């Protein structure tokens, strides 16, 4: 770890952290709190994915749909309108919409092969965005004078790294430059995340072998053809299983850093509170060693 002791972390003039864990446990909330307090650069991996690496895919998808509308088609062909994504830190809907959900096209689904192609695009974009982190640490310091840096990564980070491999290039690049902080949820959090996802299912990234197995098992269970699958029903079913699939992968990543609980995160009200919570986590790690 780049901070060996709690005292070293507390005394550091340039604090650099990466928050990871299940979506919905407070990563973006904490990152926004640090940014709004001043003196912290907030690097959103999902925003970087949706702008730098997948922005063209997203915009082309918008245009493809617009070309189906005669009125918009004529305007596009004459360069009379401009179509672009308005993705922000707080609104990642353009990226989610592009990833889509597999199944019945009449219910908004895309063919499974196309879905997997977009998943691969996301994987490549996420790895590239994570590897950009050290460069943004330097940019934040050189251009804006920010020594403090928080990397707000998506819940799927555990799907694109192998934390059991000491030579994993993404884990090495991140842990050499930031303190890895796992926000760990409990069973109650998991149940609430499933309920929240069930109310508003959204596209996500999963490892190919896991997704292919889920697609096979779901269709075998329902007896549905590929183009008859209810896209929302499939992603709801898959999400619940993905949380269990991801937990040991997050735990392996935590060996590269420290762990804080989602319950404690919910009590954090300011930068000092978060700084102290991370210091306690460093002390707890040393106590277990």
Image: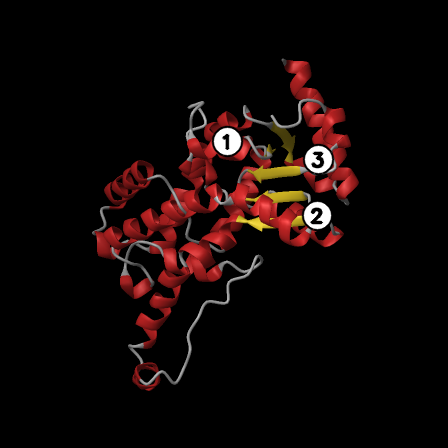
Q: Quadrant of residue 245?
A: top left
* As drawn, 183 above or below 269: above
Q: Residue furthest left?
A: 225
Disc number for residue 264: 3
Task: Find the distance from the CA under tag 2 to the CA under tag 1.
Answer: 23 Å
Q: Is residue 153 visible?
A: no
Neighbor class of circle 1 (other Cα within 10 Å; few <14, some 14-19, many 20+) is many
- Quadrant containing the C terminus is top right
Q: Can I make out residue 216 in this image?
A: yes
Where, by quadrant of the figure, is residue 165 drawn? top left
Q: Nearer the viewer, residue 77 or 115?
A: 77
Q: Estimate the x, y position of residue 21 in percent, counting from the top left.
A: 54, 38
At 56% from the left and 33% from the top, the residue drawn is 187
Name the side, left or right, on which 78 lies relative to 184: left
Q: Nearer the viewer, mark 3 or mark 2?
A: 2
Query: x, y percentage for residue 35?
Result: 69, 51
Contact between marks 2 and 1 (CB within 8 A): the answer is no
In what element is the residue under mark 2? Answer: helix
**Reading the chain from its start, which is encountered first: label 3 or label 1?**
1
> Relative to the observer, which residue lies in front, 136 or 221?
136
Residue at point 44%, 58% (across, down):
95
Q: Which mark is residue 250?
A: 1
Is residue 224 shown left or right of residue 267? left
- Specify few, some or many for label 3: CA neighbours under 10 Å numbering under 14, 14-19, or 20 or more: few
| SS of the residue under disc 3 | helix
Q: Which mark is residue 4?
A: none
What residue is at 52 percent from the left and 35 percent from the top?
174
């Amino acid at each position: 770890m780049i901070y060996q002791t709690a005292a070293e972390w507390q005394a550091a003039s340039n604090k650099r952290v990466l928050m990871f864990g299940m979506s919905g446990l407070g990563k973006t909330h904490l990152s926004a709190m640090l940014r709004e307090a001043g003196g912290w650069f907030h690097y959103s991996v999902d925003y970087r994915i949706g702008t730098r690496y997948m922005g063209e895919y997203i915009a082309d998808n918008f245009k493809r749909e617009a070309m189906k509308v005669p009125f918009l088609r004529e305007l596009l062909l004459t360069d009379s309108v401009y179509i672009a994504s308005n993705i922000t830190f707080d609104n990642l809907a353009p990226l989610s919409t592009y990833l889509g959900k597999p199944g019945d096209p009449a219910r908004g689904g895309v063919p499974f092969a196309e879905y997997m192609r977009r998943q691969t695009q996301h994987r490549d974009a996420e790895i590239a965005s994570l590897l950009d982190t050290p460069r943004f640490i330097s940019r934040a310091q050189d251009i804006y004078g920010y020594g403090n840096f928080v990397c707000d990564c998506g819940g799927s980070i555990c799907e694109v790294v192998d934390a059991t491999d000491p030579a994993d290039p993404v884990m090495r690049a991140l842990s050499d430059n930031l303190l890895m902080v796992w926000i760990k949820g409990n069973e109650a959090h998991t149940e609430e995340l499933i309920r929240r996802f069930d109310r508003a299912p959204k596209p996500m990234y999963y490892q190919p072998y896991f997704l292919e197995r889920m697609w096979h098992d779901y269709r075998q269970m329902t007896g549905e053809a590929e183009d008859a699958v209810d896209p929302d029903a499939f992603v709801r079913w898959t999400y619940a299983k993905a949380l269990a699939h991801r937990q040991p992968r997050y735990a392996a990543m935590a060996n590269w850093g420290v762990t804080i609980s989602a319950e404690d995160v919910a009590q954090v009200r300011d930068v000092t509170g978060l700084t102290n919570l991370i210091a306690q986590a460093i002390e707890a790690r040393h106590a277990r060693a």
